[in-house]
Every structure is written in C-alpha cells, then in structure tokens.
Image: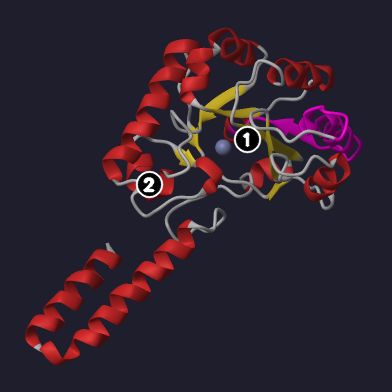
Amino acid sequence: MASAALHLGAGAATLLRPRLWPFALGAVALNHLVLTATGLWPKSRLLGPNWTRLPADSACRGEVAITIDDGPDPEVTPRILAQLGHYGARASFFCVGERVERYPELAREIVRCGHSIENHTQRHRHTFSLLGPRAIQAEIARAQDSIARVTGVSPRFFRAPAGLRNPFLEPVLCRMQLRLATWTRRGFDTVSGNADVVYRRLVSSLQGGDILLLHDGHSARTVAGAPVVLEVLPRILDAAQSRGLKPVTLQQAIDP
Ligand SMILES: [Zn+2]
C-alpha cells in the first residue's frame, strides 16, 4: 500500500509541478529497486511475515524443523522416509503439486509416516516471483487442491520456489490462511554434491528453533553418484540427537 501511495503521489506531483518529473521518476524507480531486492532475499520480512526460525516456545522445547523441498521423488523420498523413521524424527515436505499428482502413493506414505506436506506451488515455475496476483493465487490454489485431494490433508505453510517472491504474494497467503516459511540455514544440496560441505553449512551452529532446508527433488549427486541428501540427513539426525534436539514438523512447532 505504501508503494501504491508513492506511485500515486509521484503521478500527482508530476501533474501539479511538471518540472518535478525527474524526482518523481527517481522515487518510483528506487521503490521498485527496494521491492525487487527484498523479493530476492528469501529471509526478509519486509514483504510480510516469514518464518526463518521456529516460534520461541518451540525453540525452548529444543525443537528443530527439517524441511525437504521439491519432491516427492520416487528414488529419494522413500529412502528419506526410512532414515527419518529410523530416528523417530518428523519433517515437513514442501511438495510440488504436480509431483504429488504423479506420485500419489508416495505423498500418502509421507503423511502416513507422520510427516506433513506443505505447499511449494503447483509447477515450481522459476518465474514465480515475476507473476502477478492472479497467477500467484492460481499456482498456490492448484497445489493446495492437489495435495488435499491426494492426501486428505491441506497444507498450512507455503514456500516460494527458490524462496523468491514479490509484494503480491502476502495478500494471497493471507486470504488462503497460509504461513510463509523460509529457513534458518540451507545446505545448497541441489548444487553441491560434497556431503561434508552441505553438512557443515546446516549443522555448524545447530540449536533449538532452527529450520533447515534440504531437497528430495533435484538433489545433487556425490562423486559416487548417490543423492547427497541421503548421506547428509542421517548425520544431521545424529547431530540433533546428540545435542538433545527434537526434529518436529512446522505444524507441531505450533501444536505440540
Ligand atoms: Zn523448490
């Protein structure tokens, strides 16, 4: 709204005092620069509420959230479920709607194992942050429908592809009663196949309240050709266990 007011003000100033047009144009350009920069910074809160850590109560209980994006994936997801099950840990899967439709049994298995599925758009378009309000709404609503139809459970959290967004997102999330969640730390496990590096990025200062980002879809491969997430996740679960931290879903962080 502040941005809309600035545009109107700049227009009015130019009409009343035509000589002021360079200043009006400069103000509008600066406004767009700030909005764009903020949208390119996933952890920013300038465009609306954004979970970059779990709420204080949850952090005090020693809870951490492992979030796993871009699946379900027929090769990787079942093995992640087995690893989580071995440790009795819960995770939040930010799934892509059309992949949930392609692998419905896998999506139902995620929920059966006690994890939650959250909304990561219907198609995971890399142009998501360039879309207007109606297209943003459509991407999120279609994913919400796909996930609810397949699993019987509606997501309560949303994460944008690559965490990139624009000012039109927050009003849509607000209408759909979805919370935006990003992360405290990410391992860049779609880019780096080096399990040690990914592990250190995520766990170097692990503490209660952290939200960690990993991927079951688009996982980078180790030199041996294995999805890197499968080597990193058990080490993270070990580290959490040895520090007395409990991996929970984002929803459990609100409703223990
Ligand atoms: Zn993603």
Quarter of the C terminus within the rendering: top right
On screen, residue 138 versus residue 223, left or right, reads: left
Q: Is residue 181 visible?
A: no
Q: Residue at x 88, y 40 (%)?
A: 243
Q: Name the residue carrying label 1.
A: 253
User: Which region shows up in magenta?
Assistant: 223-250
236 falls in the magenta region: yes
Relative depth, front residue between 115 and 119: 119
Specify the farthest residue to the right. Answer: 242
Q: Amino acid at mark 1?
A: Ala
Where is ligand 1, by quadrant? top right
Task: Tell me, yes or no, whether the two marked residues, 1 and 2, touch with CB atoms within 8 Å.
Answer: no
Q: Which mark is residue 154?
A: none
Q: Name the residue carrying label 2.
A: 169
- Cα separation between marks 1 and 2: 24 Å
On screen, residue 10 versus residue 150, left or right, reads: left
Label 2 residue SS: helix
* 54 shown above or below 42: above
Image x and y of residue 108, in percent: 57, 10
10 falls in the magenta region: no
Q: Residue at x 67, y 50 (%)?
A: 184
Count up the numbered dots: 2
Q: Residues within 10 Å of mark 1 (few under 14, many from 20)?
A: many
Relative depth, front residue between 252 and 79: 79
Image x and y of residue 130, in percent: 38, 50
